[in-house]
Image: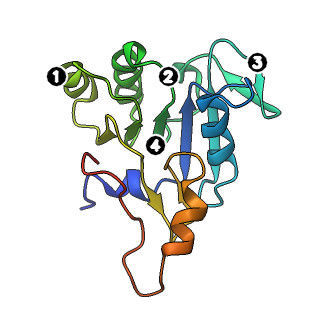
Amino acid sequence: MAAPLDRMRGARSVAVVGASARPGSFGERLAIEALRSPGFARVDLVNPGYDRVQGIAVADSLDHLDEPPDLVLFGIPDAQVPDQLRAAARLGAGGAVVYGSAAGLGDELRAAAGDMPVCGAGCMGFLNLTRGASAGLPGARLAAARRHRPGHAPGSVRSRRC
């Protein structure tokens, strides 16, 4: 039987909630990082405010994805996270990363996630260096790859909350 974190850590599909076309925004950088991660076979971008980001069609909600992603990355304001986390769990996503602090929302986030594993809140995400999948903060992939040494544990977790 697979451990609950295996699907999240070995994600082949990812949804970026809050993907943005606004230059320099967190949502834009998160979308770019996911799209250039060779470990993700499928990247879905989600934001009701855009039709396209980085030339890719954008879904207006998680409910409109063709299939549940292995991992959901939340690049949205903290107040929106509980509802989106509930939607991800309802959809059958394998796990989620919450980058924002979500101050005061801990109990609500735990209830929203149910049994779905969550990395965060207030974390830098994680990297699976063996698979080339970056669920870390934008730009973290290159720095981590430089520190990775063959024979050492891949998939570094970059947060005590993960």
Residue 1 vs 61, above or below: the answer is: below
Q: Which residue is mark 4?
A: 71
Please state which amino acid type lies under the numbered disc 1: Asp
Q: Nearer the viewer, residue 140 or 48?
A: 140
Q: Which residue is mark 2?
A: 76
N-terminal-most mark, 4 or 1: 4
Q: Which residue is mark 3?
A: 51
Please state which amino acid type lies under the numbered disc 3: Asp
Residue 146 vs 55, above or below: the answer is: below
Assess disc 3: are there few (<14), some (14-19) or many (≥20) residues with their C-alpha within 10 Å of its C-alpha.
some
Q: Nearer the viewer, mark 4 or mark 1?
A: 1
N-terminal-most mark, 4 or 2: 4
Q: Secondary structure at mark 4?
A: strand
Q: Please report the residue visible at 39 percent of the width from the left and 19 percent of the height from the top.
A: 78
Q: Please report the residue visible at 51 percent of the width from the left and 68 percent of the height from the top.
A: 129
Assess disc 1: are there few (<14), some (14-19) or many (≥20) residues with their C-alpha within 10 Å of its C-alpha.
few
N-terminal-most mark, 2 or 3: 3
C-alpha gap between disc 3 and disc 4: 22 Å
Q: Nearer the viewer, residue 140 or 134?
A: 140
N-terminal-most mark, 2 or 1: 2
* Mark sitting on residue 107: 1
Please state which amino acid type lies under the numbered disc 2: Ile
Where on the picture, by quarter, is residue 122? top left
Where on the picture, by quarter, is residue 141? bottom right
Please state which amino acid type lies under the numbered disc 4: Leu
Q: Nearer the viewer, mark 3 or mark 1?
A: 1
Percent x, y of residue 49: 67, 12
